[in-house]
Image: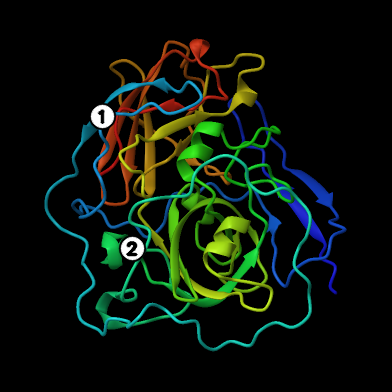
Amino acid sequence: MRIAHFTHWASLAVLSACSGTAAHISVTDGGAAQGGGFTQIGGGANTLAGGQSAGSSVFTGGAQAAGGVSNASGAVAAGGSYVPPATGGSFPKATGGAQAAGGVTPTGGALATGGAPTTGGSRATGGNKAVGGTTTTGGISAAGGASTTGGTTSSSTSQGGGGVILYGTPYNNVNMWLGPVDYVESAFHNACGLEDGTHYPTSIQTLYGDYIIGLDGENIPNVESHCDDCAQLTANGKTIIAHVVTYGIENGIDAIDLSPQARTALGLSDNNWIGTWQFCACPTNGTAIYYEFDSRQWNPQNFWYMRIWTRNQHLPVTGLETKLGSSAWSKATQAGDGAWETQSGVDFSSGFQVRVTAVDNQQIIDAIPAPTGLDPAVPVAGKTNFQ
């Protein structure tokens, strides 16, 4: 039995007039560890999502949001509008090449020996399993007919079975470990969430369901840009879609950590942990995009900057901008925990607009009310979602 030592890194963002320092906390997990498991690294360089393709038009597929549904936990609906993408240009659909027959079957790769599964910790609570468009048939079509391993994230798309929009190339025959990844953070902090002791909001847990995962923070480029994106996972002839809520140091290149529910759904076990995954559009089922704010800056109240997470987006987000009154749009930068950080020295206390850009150049504009009347623990619902 192998005992795993986990080092937990948390990043505190550089905020406005305050100078931030990184907190390094060493935590020893005395439990037995499966051949996987990862160390959370919430920090990282502020980078924008890589592999964008400029000037491209809207993807096909995906449900159009039905007018800004406000979900549980008293989410505040924000006014806003949907801006269609610029016309001209399109992302290439997968053409040519052989269609994989009967789904992806993990092959190759020696099974790791030794190591017992991680035990203890609470399972994720709250939320329903993702429904709609989660099952693929006939395998994944690789763009250009080339099947690669350890793919990279890009703006190219392909069409999976069941109408799922896939991005980049699949990560084939990788380790899929039991994290465990869960909302109560029984073993690890979720790197895409707040580091103030709070967890993913209940309303977002309900929207995401129990299928949640963590990515390889060392080998996935710009890993923080994938916070709250989705991935299609396939193993043992079974396929699910899961939300990305964390990342860290993995046991195996491009490996992922799973929630207990995702592991069970894929038929994985202590002796069977190989599968394939690929980034994809999220099944939002007509619900709106959400905005979550960093509660640490509001105690005491300080509205001279904003840290904003986008949650429940149908497509990957590549940019966020803010606007006060009639002023010009100002770009935010993405921090290591996935939050978008606005410029400092600007008074947001009277409310502001946000403009969010997706990987296919669709844009959503929402109006955020004055933060003095908001509960930072309750995300604000936009009026729509990407198509």
Residue at 30% across, 25% down = 328
Residue at 49% across, 15% down = 371
Q: Residues within 10 Å of mark 1 (few under 14, many from 20)?
A: some
As drawn, the label of residue 67 is: 1
Query: Residue 284: percent from the left, percent from the top?
Result: 36, 44
What SS does tag 2 mark?
strand
From the viewer's side, name the closer residue of 173 and 146: 173
Q: Residues within 10 Å of mark 2 (few under 14, many from 20)?
A: many
Q: Is residue 297 left or right of residue 58?
A: right
Residue at 36% across, 82% down = 147
From the viewer's side, name the closer residue of 377 and 269: 269
Query: Residue 25: percent from the left, percent from the top?
Result: 80, 46
**In terms of image quadrants, where is residue 31?**
bottom right
Of the 4 image quadrants, the one containing the C terminus is: top left
As drawn, the label of residue 166 is: 2
The kind of residue on which mark 1 rests is: Gly
